[in-house]
């Protein structure tokens, strides 16, 4: 039986091969290969955002998030989770995002099981670092994660911590490669860190970030970035370290985008660090649920704004979810958007949304009625 070092060496070789392959694609004319990503055939969306060509290859402009695989808000039964992934794969989705945090290892285990028999070179996989998991039979629910979790967690943004986290993820996923690693939730809005987040950032700047750069050079991972819900840590990483891509969650949707437009996009563009957009549906609100950014406290006026957006979408022969998803994929700085799906029907519907045509007049109406910012990029 091979030991862990041999396992990681194999992982390094495979990841290096994947990275080289991906870079060749990025350097080429950007033609998508077999397993076309939804949206790639849609003339309304940029086939290859120019900025994204520089670093993280925009092989897949659309991915599926892994929070529902971790029982976010409610238990997702095993067969439903599997069916969601099958539907996503059959529809052409080839980018999958997960984290040790999502269901305290459950999302990684489910995703890894699904990917087990999939050709490595056909998909892009991202996970995250920053929390280490510890077995604990007494843990049933943690925050928004439901079910019998059996694990607890502690933060670790040191060099040794992130290396161990990647090794643990490889084991849980049971796949021999991780393409992208995001430093997770190192942000002021993470209530566990609160005002101390800058101390954690300092640890990461000295520990996690240079170590992930080393791991990228060693070929153990394809690239790294931040996976955060606030803009400040993304800016700090772009300014002070060497990230390949930023997973910016909760800051760029149809309903809230001005701050990202003003502060993040210019830095991202200038540094050539593209973005992956997390929570493009506001954790469900823009698909009609009662969760806005992981809370049932809906900001004042948002329900009315959602109603107006829905009505205008209907008047233009489209729907709000479709508009919300395509909106997040439109900017030149965006490499991919990654909505989560609870079941197979949602996965299929979201893929169809990415392929739908939305008339230009719809976007003009949103701008003229002040529902989206004048300078927000729109598809087409
Ligand atoms: N800090 C970070 O790194 C960070 C933070 C946030 C998100 N992310 C990433 O971004 C991904 C997406 O975020 P998210 O999944 O939390 O939020 P989201 O994509 O904004 O919303 C997902 C939710 O929207 C609803 N939904 C999706 N498709 C639907 C459809 N076709 N019809 C009806 N409802 C639909 C579902 O709600 P119900 O389940 O209620 O049906 C689903 O759980 C995550 O999975 C994660 O990979 C990363």
Image (cartoon, rainbow, N blue to C red):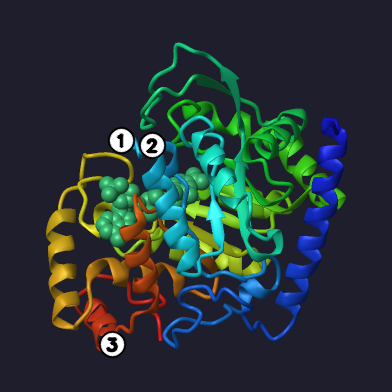
Q: Residue at x 46, y 74 (%)?
A: 38
Which quadrant holds the N terminus?
A: top right
Q: Position of residue 28 (x, y in %)?
A: 74, 83
Q: CA distance from mark 1 to mark 2?
A: 5 Å
**In-image side of 103 versus 36 (left or right):** left
Q: Residues within 10 Å of mark 1 (few under 14, many from 20)?
A: few
Which residue, as the protein is rendered here, is positioned at the far top? 138
Disc 1 vs disc 2: Cβ atoms closer than 8 Å?
yes
Q: Which of disc 3 and disc 1 is earlier in sequence?
A: 1
- Residue receiving disc 2: 71
Q: Residue at x 31, y 65 (%)?
A: 254
Question: Of residues 84 and 369, which is closer to you in this image?
Answer: 84
Q: Which of disc 2 and disc 3 is earlier in sequence?
A: 2
**In-image side of 26 versus 98 (left or right):** right
Q: Residues within 10 Å of mark 2 (few under 14, many from 20)?
A: many
Q: Is mark 1 within 8 Å of ligand 1?
A: yes
- Above or below: residue 221 compared with residue 201: below
- Residue receiving disc 1: 74
Q: Secondary structure at mark 1?
A: loop
Question: Of residues 312 and 30, which is closer to you in this image?
Answer: 30
Which quadrant holds the C terminus?
A: bottom left
Instruction: Please identify the quarter of the rendering in which residue 267 is found.
Output: bottom right
């Amino acid at each position: 039986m091979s030991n862990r070092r041999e396992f990681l060496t194999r992982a390094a070789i495979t990841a290096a091969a994947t990275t080289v392959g991906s870079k060749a694609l990025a350097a080429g004319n950007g033609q998508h290969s077999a397993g076309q990503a939804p949206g790639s055939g849609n003339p309304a969306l940029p086939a290859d955002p120019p900025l994204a060509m520089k670093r993280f290859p925009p092989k897949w402009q659309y991915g599926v998030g892994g929070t529902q695989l971790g029982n976010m808000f409610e238990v997702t039964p095993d067969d439903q989770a599997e069916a969601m992934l099958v539907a996503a794969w059959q529809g052409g989705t080839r980018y999958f995002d997960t984290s040790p945090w999502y269901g305290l290892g459950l999302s990684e285990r489910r995703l890894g099981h699904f990917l087990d028999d999939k050709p490595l070179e056909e998909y892009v996989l991202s996970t995250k670092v920053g929390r280490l998991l510890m077995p604990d039979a007494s843990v049933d629910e943690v925050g928004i994660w439901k079910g019998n979790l059996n694990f607890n967690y502690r933060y670790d943004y040191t060099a040794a911590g992130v290396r161990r986290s990647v090794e643990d993820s490889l084991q849980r996923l049971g796949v021999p490669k991780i393409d992208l690693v995001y430093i997770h939730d190192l942000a002021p809005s993470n209530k566990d860190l609160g005002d101390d987040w800058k101390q954690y950032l300092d640890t990461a700047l000295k520990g996690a970030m240079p170590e992930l750069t080393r791991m990228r050079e060693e070929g153990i991972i394809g690239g790294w970035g931040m996976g955060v819900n606030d803009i400040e840590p993304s800016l700090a990483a772009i300014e002070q370290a060497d990230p390949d891509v930023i997973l910016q969650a909760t800051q760029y949707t149809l309903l809230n985008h001005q701050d990202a437009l003003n502060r993040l996009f210019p830095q991202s563009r200038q540094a050539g660090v593209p973005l992956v957009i997390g929570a493009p549906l506001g954790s469900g609100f823009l698909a009609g649920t009662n969760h806005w950014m992981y809370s049932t406290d809906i900001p004042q006026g948002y329900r009315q704004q959602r109603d107006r957006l829905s009505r205008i979408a209907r008047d233009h022969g489209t729907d709000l979810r479709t508009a919300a998803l395509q909106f997040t994929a439109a900017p030149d700085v965006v490499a991919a958007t990654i909505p989560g799906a609870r079941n197979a029907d949602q996965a299929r519907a979201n893929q169809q949304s990415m392929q739908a045509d939305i008339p230009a007049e719809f976007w003009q109406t949103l701008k003229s009625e002040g529902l989206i910012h004048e300078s927000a990029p729109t598809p087409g």
